[in-house]
């Protein structure tokens, strides 16, 4: 990693940097409940996240009911931590308020374009990550659940979402019963580019370093007894995108009022 620090000087850090540096996805939780006050504190902080043009095109559904959690678990390929979640937060892209504003001025957002869909989805994602950090700061751990998009229409039905709202991802939060070892990430110098794509800090060419990451990820999985291929990340990535995942998602989102034209 390139650095302008003098030799021997400690790296720049902070409580937030350390939180992110040590982050892992936690899927096992104690029976201690997550209180409404804790959820309120987390979400109220998260709603200060950046939002495009102050649109605030998101909504969050707080789910505790065991029956609803069981249905969400079914949609998300039977994830047990969803069914047993102390609390599940569904982060949704929400165009209902935009729709109301535009209609009040005589317009409409029928056949909304790609930018509108991206703005609302990014807004929801920014709030979600902010909520994750806020939750961690008060002792809660969790995991993001993108599998709600396995069947966006069914997820919308379970959550009672109106037209112009879809669930971008969910989040399980609770108090950790077990914290797994941290999975390695790709080398910093393989994903950070300077001035133009493909250029290192010193002007040389960026090496994707996939082979090195395959080896590091394989070693991680073998250390926890999880079977993997010799080219661990490459094999996983190819498997996940051959065939392309969630091929019905575009039509499901269109049916929910997100055209992405």
Image (cartoon, grey):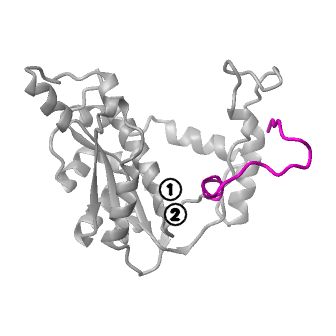
Asked whether the residues under the numbered discs 1 and 2 touch, taking CB atoms below 8 Å apart as contact, a structural biologist would say: yes
Give the residue pinned by disc 1. Answer: 133
The numbered disc on residue 54 is none
**Secondary structure of the residue carrying numbered label 2:** helix
Residue name at image x 22 percent, y 35 percent: 95
Q: Position of residue 22 (x, y in %)?
A: 65, 59
Where does residue 190 sit, x and y in percent of width and height?
A: 73, 34
The quadrant where residue 182 appears: bottom right
Image-based side of 241 in relation to 223, left or right? left
Is residue 7 rendered magenta in the image? yes
Q: Residue at x 45, y 50 (%)?
A: 130
Q: For this rendering, which residue is in front, 223 or 111?
A: 111
Please, what secondary structure does the residue beneath circle 1 have?
Answer: helix
Image location (x, y in percent) of residue 78: 37, 62
**Residue of label 2:** 137
Q: Mark 1 to mark 2: distance in Å?
A: 6 Å
Residue 256 in view (yes/no): no
Q: In the rendered structure, which segment of residues is drawn in magenta?
A: 1-22
Query: Toward the viewer: 170 or 202?
Result: 202
Q: Does any portion of residue 190 appear in the rendered image?
A: yes
Q: Is residue 235 magenta?
A: no
């Amino acid at each position: 990693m390139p650095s302008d620090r003098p030799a021997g000087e400690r790296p720049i850090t902070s409580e937030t940097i350390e939180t992110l540096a040590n982050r892992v996805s936690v899927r096992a939780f104690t029976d201690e409940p997550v209180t409404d006050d804790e959820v309120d504190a987390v979400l109220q902080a998260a709603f200060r996240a950046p939002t495009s043009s102050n649109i605030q095109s998101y909504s969050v559904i707080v789910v505790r009911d065991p029956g609803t959690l069981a249905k969400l678990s079914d949609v998300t390929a039977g994830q047990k931590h969803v069914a047993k979640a102390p609390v599940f937060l569904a982060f949704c892209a929400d165009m209902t308020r935009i729709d109301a504003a535009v209609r009040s001025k005589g317009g409409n957002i029928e056949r909304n374009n790609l930018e509108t869909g991206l703005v609302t989805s990014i807004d929801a994602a920014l709030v979600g990550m902010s909520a994750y950090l806020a939750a961690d700061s008060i002792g809660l751990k969790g995991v993001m659940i993108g599998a709600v998009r396995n069947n966006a229409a069914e997820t919308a039905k379970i959550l009672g979402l109106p037209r112009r709202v879809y669930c971008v991802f969910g989040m399980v939060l609770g108090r950790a019963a077990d914290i797994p070892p941290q999975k390695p990430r790709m080398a910093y110098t393989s994903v950070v580019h300077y001035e133009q794509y493909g250029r290192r800090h010193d002007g040389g060419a960026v090496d994707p370093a996939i082979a090195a990451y395959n080896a590091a990820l394989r070693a991680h999985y073998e250390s926890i007894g999880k079977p993997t291929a010799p080219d661990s990340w490459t094999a996983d990535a190819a498997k996940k995108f051959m065939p392309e995942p969630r091929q019905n998602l575009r039509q499901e989102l269109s049916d929910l009022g997100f055209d992405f034209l």
